[in-house]
């Protein structure tokens, strides 16, 4: 249960639509993270027909105590597309409600599309999210604003979500005087993570990085993720490649280098190897992480991605296990409470066991 959310403006502010309640004794919380969400382009006819692209994912998101995604398009009808960029995305403002209705509570904005329609597009996006009661991180009016975490109280546990972008165009990154995304400079990330940890929060770091359509890591991914973990991050989760990449465990922290796409209205057939990450966090830190196989082909799902069941999940899960073994991480075959095949990693025992 999400009991209170502290907005990015500071600890005195409460996120819209969320009622603050007294802090309760910390128990544990389930966190679900999905990859790239872009609710435009080929989704437009689906929306006009009244279809819900989250209809298969919403039960998983709503069942979580905290659900997070990467929002990879501005919510705006204004502005001009950035010149010289092959793909520019934008989504009607009213579609912010789909995020909230699906159960998403935080979205990362640090990516290579959120500034496709300039500062006015970003301003419309944050206004729409605020109106829908969805918190955000990873972009803002300047670099200080962009680096602020979304901080939430979840079942008595404080959780901080930070998001960073390490993709082109470089002009999308915020500066002291320019709106944009939070750049993934290792020193900045370490400073931000330490500050969030000092507030007593469990820290989740989202990176938009890597090579599109590649299962292999770029060299800096391991360096950057280890730096975040050394500073105190519990979960590090990547997006942008549109495919799944390997998983690492560093002490009591877990790094998922890419979980791929989620609800993405791009081409009729998208890459199919994406993941849903589900983690259990307790007062003592990360306890368990599960990876569920996600079918994201718009052709096969009619623009409503679904969890892969039975034998349909095994090839992708086997591929992710092999990629993770190359990184020195052994993932176990498992089955979720719902009966879905998954890869599982037990990190630390729950308190009292």
Image: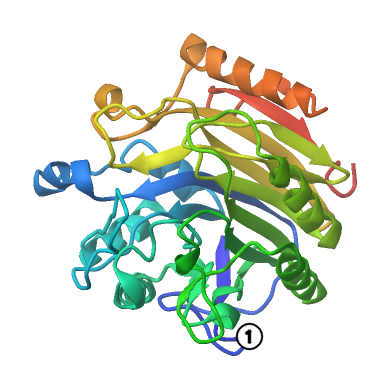
- Left/right placement of residue 135 relative to residue 162 reads left
Residue drawn at x 35%, y 35% is 56
Task: Quadrant for residue 85, please give it.
Answer: bottom left
Q: Answer whether residue 145 is visible to the viewer in this image.
A: yes
Residue that appears at 51% across and 61% down: 110
**Along the line of sight, the residue nearer the viewer: 136 or 350:** 136
**Is 251 situated above or below 202?**
above
Q: Position of residue 43 (x, y in %)?
A: 21, 43
The crowd level at tag 1 (other Cα within 10 Å; few <14, some 14-19, many 20+) is few
Q: Is residue 67 above or below residue 186?
A: above
Q: Is residue 221 left or right of residue 8?
A: right
Q: Residue furthest bottom?
A: 12
**Residue ID for mark 1:** 11
Q: Residue at 53%, 68% (x, y): give it.
A: 137
What is the quadrant of the N terminus in the image? Answer: bottom right
Q: Position of residue 154 (x, y in %)?
A: 63, 64
Q: Is residue 195 above or below residue 105?
A: below
- In the rendered image, is residue 334 in sight? no
Q: Residue at x 80, y 70 (%)?
A: 194
């Amino acid at each position: 249960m999400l009991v209170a959310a502290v907005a990015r403006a500071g600890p005195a502010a409460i996120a819209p639509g969320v009622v603050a309640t007294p802090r309760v004794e910390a128990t544990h919380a389930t966190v679900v993270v999905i990859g790239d969400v872009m609710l435009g382009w080929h989704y437009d006819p689906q929306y006009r027909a009244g279809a819900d692209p989250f209809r298969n994912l919403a039960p998983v998101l709503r069942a979580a105590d905290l659900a997070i995604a990467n929002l990879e398009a501005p919510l705006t009808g204004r502005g001009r597309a950035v010149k010289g960029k092959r793909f520019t995305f934008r989504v009607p403002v009213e579609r912010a409600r789909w995020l909230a209705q699906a159960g998403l509570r935080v979205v990362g904005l640090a990516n290579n599309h959120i500034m496709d329609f300039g500062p006015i597009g970003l301003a419309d996006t944050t206004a729409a999210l605020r109106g829908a009661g969805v918190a955000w991180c990873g972009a803002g009016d300047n670099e200080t604003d962009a680096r602020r975490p979304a901080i939430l109280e979840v079942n008595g546990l404080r959780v901080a979500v930070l998001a960073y972008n390490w993709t082109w165009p470089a002009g999308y990154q915020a500066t002291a005087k320019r709106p944009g995304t939070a750049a993934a400079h290792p020193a900045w990330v370490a400073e931000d993570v330490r500050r969030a940890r000092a507030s007593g929060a469990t820290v989740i770091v989202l990176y938009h990085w890597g090579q599109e359509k590649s299962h292999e890591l770029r060299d800096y991914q391991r360096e950057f993720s280890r730096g975040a973990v050394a500073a105190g991050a519990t979960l590090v989760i990547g997006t942008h490649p549109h495919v799944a990449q390997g998983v690492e465990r560093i002490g009591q922290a877990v790094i998922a280098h890419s979980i791929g796409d989620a609800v993405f209205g791009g081409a009729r057939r998208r890459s199919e190897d994406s993941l849903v990450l589900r983690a259990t966090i307790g007062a003592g830190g990360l306890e368990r992480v599960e990876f569920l196989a996600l079918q994201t082909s718009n052709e096969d799902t009619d623009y409503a991605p679904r969890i892969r069941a039975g034998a349909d999940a095994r090839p992708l899960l086997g591929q992710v296990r092999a990629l993770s073994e190359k990184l020195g991480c052994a993932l176990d075959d498992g089955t979720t409470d719902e009966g879905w095949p998954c890869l599982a990693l037990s990190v630390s025992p729950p308190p009292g066991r």
